[in-house]
Amino acid sequence: MAKLDLGGVLYPSTIAKDACDAFVRGDNKHLMLCGAHGTGKSFAAYQIALKLTETTDSANDIVLIQGTDTAAEISSKLAQLRLMTITGKCKVAIIDELDSATTAAMKQIVSFYNRDEKRDYKDRIAMIMTENDERPGNSQYQKLRDRFQFVRWDLPAKDEIKKHLVSSDPDKDACVDACRSFRDLERSLK
């Protein structure tokens, strides 16, 4: 089990760590974290994006799109993202809770992704998507998922969580604060 060197994120597996490390190195531009609600996917996505951009000023480098946003809000954020990528101001987009997006919003996201894929690899925007469940029946969703590095993001084993929480690691509070499940598990493991 491996822990990120930032923000107190605890990877659920070595496979997940390797995939996220490859993303940060630029080996791939698209990462999808999939797992149950409350496992820390959103927190991990944000911390990975910060590591990728090497900044704490996310307003200039990271665009966050929520799957729960309306189609109009997503359209507006994608338009902002297009402008930011043209000017080189945006380095990474996080699309959180993709499984909550409406069909219309999903079409907009897929369309944006397809346009970005036509750019030179080095100029493409890095994207991290999170989802709470897999929707294999949705063709727009499947088109996107098939082109992303898929990472299963489940809770680590209780022993690993306990080891992380009781260690002298100064980042343990960030981990506990960021993920309700870790707080609940910490109480149950005492």
Image (tube, rainbow, N blue to C red):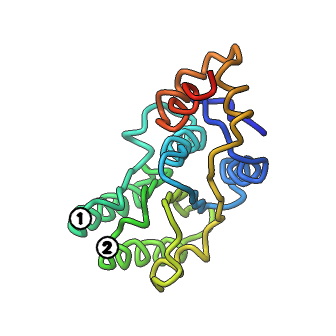
Q: Quadrant of the C terminus?
A: top right
x and y percent of residue 31 in the render? 60, 59
**Residue 176 position (above or below residue 83):** above
Q: Which residue is found at the position 76% from the left and 37% from the top?
A: 2
Please give left or right for residue 184 compared with residue 17 in the image: left
Please give left or right for residue 82 compared with residue 139 in the image: left
Mark 2 residue element: loop
Q: Which residue is found at the position 30% from the left and 78% from the top?
A: 104
Amino acid bearing label 2: Thr
CB within 8 Å, label 2 to label 1:
yes
Q: Which residue is mark 2?
A: 102
x and y percent of residue 175 in the render? 55, 29
**Residue 135 position (above or below residue 189):** below
As rendered, which of 81 and 30 lies closer to the eye?
30
**Residue 156 position (above or below residue 97):** above
How packed is label 2: few (under 14 Cα within 10 Å), some, or many (20 or more)?
some
Amino acid bearing label 1: Thr
Mark nearer the N terminus (2 vs 1): 1
As rendered, which of 155 and 13 lies closer to the eye?
155
Q: Which residue is found at the position 49% from the left and 46% from the top?
A: 38
How packed is label 1: few (under 14 Cα within 10 Å), some, or many (20 or more)?
some
Q: Quadrant of the N terminus?
A: top right
Q: Which residue is mark 1?
A: 70
Q: How many callouts does the rendering have?
A: 2
What numbered label is drawn on residue 148?
none
Q: Which residue is found at the position 57% from the left and 29% from the top?
A: 188
Residue 6, image quadrant: top right
Could you give the CA–CA distance between mark 2 and mark 1, rounded to whole angstroms? 8 Å
Mark 1 residue element: loop
